[in-house]
Amino acid sequence: MSDSTTLPHHPLGKELSNWGRWGDDDEIGTLNFITPAKRVASARLVRTGKTFDLGMAFGKEGPATAGSFRENPQHVMTLPPSDTAGFPDGPISSDDMVVMSLQAATQWDGLGHMGYDGHFYNNVPAAAINNFAGVSRNSFDKAAGRLISRGVLLDIAALKGVDRLDESYEITVADLLAAEERQGVRVESGDILCIRTGWHQWFAEGDRDHYMSEVEPGPGMDTLPWLHEREVAALALDNWAVEVSPSPVDGAYAPFHQIAIRDMGLTLGEMWDFEALAADCAQDGVWEFLLCASGLKVTASAGSPITPIALKQQPGSRYGSRPNTWSTPPLPHAARRPTGYRSACGIRPYDGPWTTYGPSQARTGTAESRRAFRPTLHRPTGQKTDQTGNLTVSHTSPRPTGRSSTPNPKLIVPVLALAGVVVAVMQTLVLPIVPRLPRLLDTSSSDASWAVTATLLTSAVATPVAGQLGDMYGKRRLARRFMDPRHGMANDSFPLFTDAQYTAVQRRRGDLVSVGLGYPPGGGGRTP
């Protein structure tokens, strides 16, 4: 990096520099903070499917003003339907083209957009960007598909109690922290931070000149260390140049751009529209969302037009979050296999892959619904959450701790005694009709005796087992229906009893418990 300190903000650039942090060949900068795990966690924010278009329209009435080095898009029809009328079977078609500046309206400023001292991000010389090769290094097309992450909106205008901030209002770190506190949200590593100033309203009201004027609110230079510390992946605002204008550094043009893009490798978004999103966030208290803001893969480009889309979540549905409240995802509870139920008569803990779920996935609804029999919630894939709330895969798990999962002798003895009494009573009642069974069933005496004996014995064992399940999960009738041998005998599906697999929600700090009955498929204690 050059040792130039010709302007006061250049030493700050050295302090916040990310050159070489992700290697000498890195061309995407802080977008490296958007990891695959971050995208997985961000995808969990989508619950209701509610979407918000955060972009301007691209047309000849765009924000570019006369005399600007950027031009509004010029749209031309290259194939009108009238030119396709000669086909014999009568189809018509149309085609078109557009001529535009890539940063004419809602846009990303790429890492080849701004530099100083003859260099761009990661020590790329100015000669690498020219009329022939375009942006040969730090081109936006390298980053086009990476801008999908958790978005956080901080409404500074609402914080100040105004529809839009005053001209040249400088947003400070204190403002950002106050907005986090007010909204109950926190900016994390890998987030795309969206800041609302209300400035877009000038354009929406038709005052394009005021919108594109040389005085606008925006973040000041003291916010750059905060953005660096929070590891923000990208920054977007609803004004035309992101930073406060006029420049807070005497003699410097766009000093915020210089440090953010050239030194930090921070992608900047301009001319976004947060009005509808901000209104919805204020209504439901949820200021985080999945943000999809991929740009065009224009080869060797300095930036890109975009139509960013925010997908909101349902209030309180995020792992650990509540309406108007946000905190870092809570740590998952201690890894353990729940064994808090009796294991008499062969009922034992599930011995396959298991899942630790976040509290919000099993602690919603009433107490009765939390105890309900909910097989659709079980995902025996070996997935569990790590301490960041991200999914990891574990194919093995420790043996159960706590109370033993082996049959309890103190329970087996009375259960067997009860079974003997039941068998004796039922044999006394049924024995007189045994001689008539061969004629009734049209079979031999040995087959009939086997049927009666099997029915009595399985009933003696199945009944207390069904009662045990009913006491635990409040589903006595359902358990008996599948375990009653009469059901299996009548439908020629007795193996249903031995292969039955149940999933139940046990209220043990939000954990999901899978219960295996008899002999699970494959004999390995794992459900398919």
Image (cartoon, rainbow, N blue to C red):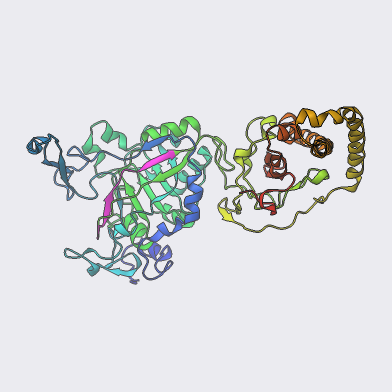
The mark total stands at: 0
Locate residue 183, reporting x and y percent: 51, 38
Q: Is residue 7 visible?
A: yes
Report the span colored magenta. Answer: 299-311
Task: Reply above or below: 79 against 335.
Answer: above
Residue 307, image quadrant: top left
Residue 165 x/y as whole percent: 36, 37
Q: Can you tell which quarter of the image residue 308 is in?
A: top left
- Residue 370 locus on image (x, y percent): 67, 34
- Residue 304 magenta-drawn? yes
The foreground one among 3 and 359 is 359
Residue 1 sits inside the magenta stretch? no
**Is residue 450 toward the left or the right of residue 359 in the image?**
right
Q: Which residue is at 48% across, 40% downward?
A: 46
In terms of depth relative to the viewer, which is nearer, 35 or 3?
35
Res 219 visible: no
Q: Residue at x 52, y 42 (%)?
A: 185
211 relative to 242, above or below: above
Q: Quadrant of residue 513?
A: top right
- Rendering coords of residue 250 (x, y %): 30, 56
On screen, residue 391 versus residue 138, left or right, reads: right
In this rendered view, identify the residue nearer to me: 274 or 388: 388
Look at the image and tell me in which quarter the N terminus lies: bottom left
Q: Is residue 397 left or right of residue 127?
A: right
